[in-house]
Image (cartoon, rainbow, N blue to C red):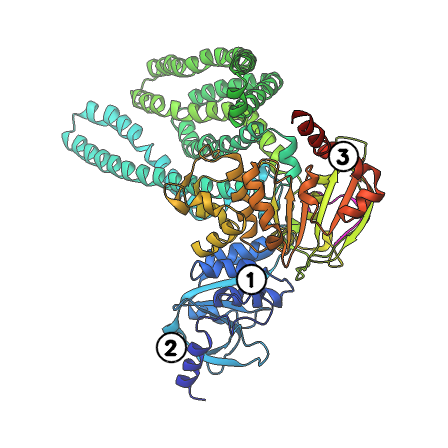
Amino acid sequence: MPMGQRLGSLRQCYRPTSPADAGDGRQTSGEAIHPRAQAVMVAARFHGIELDPGEAISMGARGAPSAVALCEWAQNAGMWARAVRLRWRQLMHFVDDAGPVVLLLTDGSATLMVGGDSDRNAVLLRDPRALASEITVAVDELRLERVWSGEAVLLRAQRGQMTTDAPFTLSWLSRLVLQEKPSLRDIGLASLTLSFLTIFPPLLVMTVVDKVLTHHSYSTLLLLGTILAITTIYEAVLGYARRLIVMVVGARLDTKLNLHVFNRLLRLPLDYFERHPAGETMHKITQVYKVREFLTGKLLATFLDMITLAVLLPFLFYLNSSLAFVVLACSALIVLVVLAYLRPLQRVFSKVILAESEKASALGETVFGVKTVKSLALEPQRRMLWDARVAEAGKSRLAFGKLANWPQTIVNPIERFMSIGVVLVGAYIAIADKSGYAVGALFAFMMLSMRVAQPLAGLARLIENYEEVGAAISETASVLNRPLEYDALSRGLRPQLSGAIAFDDVSFTYGSTKIPALDRVSFAVPAGTMLGIVGRSGSGKSTLTRLLQGINRDYSGFVKIDGNDVREINLRHLRQSFGVVLQENFLFRGPICENIIAGRPGLTLSDAVRAARLAGAEEFIERMPNGYETLIEEGSPNLSGGQRQRLAIARALITDPRILILDEAMSALDPESEAVLNANLLRIAHGRTMIIVSHRLSSLVDCDQILVLESGKAVDIAPHRVLLERCGIYRQLWNQQNRHLGNQGPRHAQAS
């Protein structure tokens, strides 16, 4: 086939995918996977990793995915991925590589480079959607450059520990800083040059004193002035460039740290956030920026000063070795003083950390619970708590400040002697010198000595600052170094779930108690079942749903969905197969429509309207000022409890989940909203398994099966009428909730 026809075939192969011809049959619901996402999926499959098609569909709904987005998608699945821009010569180096290279074409599609033909100077490309035929197209450099600008995605299986999964330590942060080697090299060269330039002014002063003043040479003075002006301008420009590079490095590190910290937080298990106050977590996380400031601020400044010291110290010994030894002796004394106070400062600062954490916890708890504070008029109590925490923090800070003031008090006279002592000793040497040239050298030494003393004193203080930074690292690490959900999120099976649920001898105990929340629970329901779960408070109803969602995974026995052990299923895939509505649901700040389609951002307004109608939320949304574009404020103050609950149900239904969990979802509904939702329950349950956890037994009478729990044990499972006849616990709960029905008749009869 001629090369022109091959290129035409290449363009034809990689046209945007339609639902009719997209994919290899793995995606569901007839939705199209974007060609770029399809290419990455095929490349990942080559390395034995299956990416989530649902995420690919969402990426394609927002237009052509970028190289960075594709890399993040692969990295979240545990792969090594890099977005690169290659030239033809670099691309040819990957011809014999161990896997396909994803080339992102200029029309928004993609192709796979699977090999090359060095004799013909061509690469072999394959359509990622034509796996069965294994057809490759040979394309040379000229033809490829017409459809490819150089963007590519490199993929391979992860080898060893990922950088993002390494423990958060000072060494990890140091490696992060060292990734900026080119910029750091430029900063080092600029600093070295500036260090040499600092020698020129003292040399010029020494020459002026020794030559110009002695011989009254105006030409030498003019020459020295010109040299000084040139070096001053050059030093200013170079200093500006160095500061600019330092700012760029700081901004890049801030960006990487922000992304890393947020990603780690999202991958922490839910039970961590349930056990730790949000204010405490936020306070500890913000400590990471103290570390960043230390690395790119004081540490970098001290490192640059050390470069200056390495250049100037030999020159000082050249000028006057006696004065140089005076400077070194004073600097050594400063270091010894700081080291002597290091351990006591560390002990006192640990109390400061504890007090600040308690203060942040009190603040965060008050802010997040401000509705309760206002409704119960708890302002005086919270103010007293805050005053106590502030006083404790202030007392700890003051104790630390008093102790830290002593080394500074001792160091100040040494620093003063270092500057004045050099003048006195230098003056004595100059008086004793008979040649007359010692005066110029003394002036030069005085100008340079403080440039040397400052880095040495800064190095001593750096050791003192390290204690505070070490404490900040410990605080941040106490959050970020906790076990992550990474393996479960990125690996595991991705079966097509129908909704058959089985518990086989399942027992689970929370870490904070010895009493099992679930004790050898066993039951099974087929797909499409409407299952009600009832029981007294603390019987294990919500715990059962948590195990289904994979929130808690350290249980004994087996929890299975369609015969697949929940612990073997990819956690993200598992949770995307669920729709969950809780008793208290959080709505994000933004339009109502965006809140409803939060689980599938690629969907449209019509999808949001359909879900809202099914949840019984359409009628109140249409009465809102801007309909589906009405802005929900933070904390949802402009919505009633029932309205928030119906929006949460619509948000759960938008993804068309195979399993829908309503965990006390009707407790906050008003009678009208509950009636609307009950009327729609059968429509909502159609084609999916529905699990309804409720204290209101009247809302469960239409369930196919009702599971009765008591003290973590499964007492019985049957329809409503059967349970009334044979289950004493269920009958007792039913009678307690419906005893008023039996009293209505006599009461009305007596009134009449």
Q: Seen in the image, is 186 located left or right of residue 522?
A: left
Specify the amino acid type for callout 1.
Answer: Leu
**Image quadrant assignment for residue 479:** top right
In three-dimensional space, the C-alpha distance between marks 1 and 3, rounded to whole angstroms, equals: 63 Å
Q: Which residue is mark 3?
A: 735
Specify the amino acid type for callout 2.
Answer: Leu
Q: Which residue is mark 1?
A: 155
Q: Quadrant of the C terminus?
A: top right
Q: Work out whether 744 lies above or below 724.
A: above
Q: Work out whether 229 lies above or below 680.
A: above
Residue range highlighted in magenta: 550-560
**Image quadrant assignment for residue 476:** top right
In percent of width and height, residue 291 lies at 51, 32
In three-dimensional space, the C-alpha distance between marks 2 and 3, rounded to whole angstroms, equals: 83 Å
Q: Nearer the viewer, mark 1 or mark 3?
A: 3
Q: Which residue is mark 2?
A: 142
In percent of width and height, residue 8 lies at 41, 81
Which element type, helix, strand or loop, lies under badge 2? Answer: helix
Judging depth in this view, the residue of 129 and 633 nearest the camera is 633
Judging depth in this view, the residue of 731 and 367 nearest the camera is 731
Does residue 180 show up?
A: no
In percent of width and height, residue 626 lies at 37, 43
Lower sequence index among marks 1 and 3: 1
